[in-house]
Image: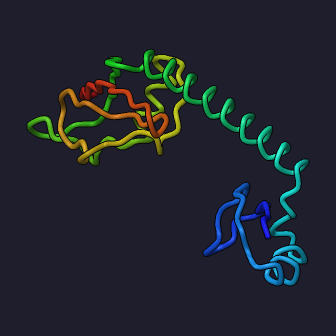
Amino acid sequence: MKVVLTKDVPGQGKSGDVISVAEGYARNYLFPRGMAVEASRGKMKELAVRRQAQASKEKQIEQEARALAARLDNLKLIVIAKQGEGGKLFGSVNNKDIADALAAQHKIKLDKKKLVVKEPIKHLGAYTITAKLHPAVQAEIIVDVVGE
């Protein structure tokens, strides 16, 4: 029997998948728990429309990420930090500091979780930070750490 999964089912598939299962499994387990519906023509058309809408939404999100990446690529950002002897910082510059500086200087709000700092920034100087905006889109930001 062919069914359309309405929820993720471990070992069977994800929501929206069309799978073939035993009739008893479908009627006694999947249907009563609301995990699947029978794969009729109407449900298949509805599934196709839903997938098309999801694909266009993902394409729109990727386009927005590419536009933001074009704006961010090789952007110079200045972060001011307290320094000690020899250009060494008190503490380090982290993702939150960079995100706050980006919002203050360039009016771009970016989640700190999207910024990738390869190693802690503990000295004055220029660093290249990667911003992962989308699985397929990344941008490089140049962070210049200066002392107070």
- Compared to residue 87, the image places residue 34 above or below, namely below
Count of numbered badges drawn on the protein: 0
Q: Quadrant of the N terminus?
A: bottom right
On the image, the x and y values in percent for residue 92 come to 28, 45
Q: Image height check: is 93 above or below 108? A: below
Name the residue rendered at 53%, 22% in the picture: 108
Which corner quadrant of the image does residue 17 belong to? bottom right
The picture places residue 49, in percent across and down from the top left corner, at: 80, 38
Closest to the observer, 132 or 60 = 60
For this view, does 125 lie left or right of residue 116?
A: left
Q: Which image quarter is the C terminus in?
A: top left
Q: Name the residue nearer the viewer: 34 or 91.
A: 34
Question: Residue visible at 43% across and 16% down?
Answer: 70
Q: Quadrant of residue 121?
A: top left
- Residue 18 screen position, x and y as percent: 72, 59
Q: Which of 23 and 72 is in front in this view?
A: 23
Q: Residue at x 75, y 64 (%)?
A: 7
| Residue 59 place in picture, x, y as percent | 60, 29
